[in-house]
Amino acid sequence: MKSQVYASCYDERSCAMKSTVLLCLFSALIGAGFWQWWTTAFLEPTVGAQDVQPAMLPSSFEGDLTPDELVNVYVYENVNRSVVNITTRAGRLDTFFFSLESSAEGAGSGSILDRQGHVLTNSHVIEGAREIQVTLFNGQTFPATLMGADTVYDIAVLKIDAPAEVLHPVRWGSSNDLRVGQKVLAIGNPFGLERTMTVGIISSLNRSLPSRRSRMMKSIIQIDAALNQGNSGGPLLDSRGRLIGMNTAIASRTGENTGVGFAIPVNNIQRVVPQLIENGRVIRPDLGITRVYQVEQGLVIATLAPDGPAERAGLRGFRLVRQQHRRGPFVYEETQIDRSTADLIIAVDGQRVRVADDLLSIVDQKRPGEEIVLTVIREGREIQVPVILGAGD
């Protein structure tokens, strides 16, 4: 089986224009009275969301377009103003999952979050940038300030000083109840072609992708909507035009669309964005275990952060044993590692852990100051060790 390369949807203007973007239209939804039902059931504004006011479609569309096409038209006409084009300048740009030498310019996509000028995009879109420009739907371009970025989640928030009347926030959706086969729409700037929409379905849920910090991003949405370089950071939308994810990568050996794209779920984004705006970074819960070794039964603790949460809770790692030896007139010290005293983690809060990423994923769902309970095997006995999580990066 040939290996897959996960490439970003990040455009580099030194690359020549690729082939025409394929537009995949989902099969028409058929049923008498569907349009009347859809407009009443699906165009209802979401409580608490910053709604885009639905525009009434011309009556002539009803005779010319199918109900499914009308969905596409409605979503595009109401959401495309929420999508921005992001251009960056840097001495060298390094793309996500796809390391390339590049020119001083790069491009990606983003979504307007509020009328204060906050813009959502991927962290890899702006990584290494010395200058960031955001272009709105009306062609106006504004310099952007980086509020914060997180490479583990691949999320960044920018800020532009633009009049509120030209800022059209995207509506928040939810990724809790997504289903395989559900229709999705992506809007972005592939190859610099601004506000291009493609349509597809959710192909799978709960995928994992490696992040820039050798961590695994969880709960990733897999889609078949065409994504190409420049789509990174753009919104993934449901049929109501609500944000359910952010397009981030494609599975490709060439960097071009292959029908396998990936998006970060909106629920992950909603947890991270407030921290980036307030703190400029994500404050993560810290367990205080700095190294583990994977064995068949679980994870053996190797090292602990001095005076960290795990050490204060009484967890044990490898023990260094120092012995002095004399050889003639010389005395030398030898250090050996005693592994027999180390705790073996088999579960956290009742959930089995087999690899380090299992442990990290469970801890990441918590907040600093919360308690978790580790089930460990110590000297042949199974015990429960409660740990109060600290705060870290």
Image: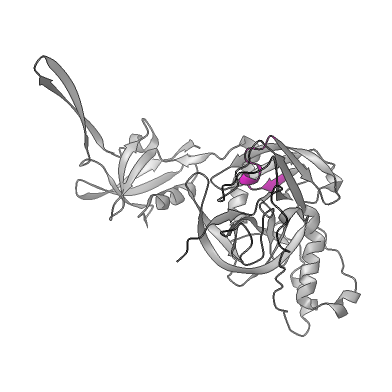
Vertical placement of 208 versus 337: above or below? below
Residue closer to the observer: 153 or 347? 153
Farthest top residue in view? 329
Farthest front residue in view? 16
Residue 350 percent coordinates (x, y) = 37, 55
Vertical placement of 195 versus 157: above or below? below
- Residue at the spot x=39%, y=38% of the render? 288
Number of numbered callouts drawn: 0
Q: Quadrant of residue 101?
A: top right
Q: Quadrant of the N terminus?
A: bottom left
Q: Quadrant of residue 319?
A: top left
- Residue at the spot x=91%, y=76% of the render? 60
Residue 229 percent coordinates (x, y) = 67, 54
By what rule are the colours in the image chosen? one colour
Residue closer to the observer: 124 or 375? 124
Residue closer to the observer: 173 or 98? 98
Q: Is residue 129 magenta?
A: yes
Residue closer to the observer: 380 or 2? 2
Q: Quadrant of residue 148?
A: top right
- Residue at the spot x=55%, y=67% of the render? 204
Please state the extent of the stretch shown in magenta in the rendering.
119-130
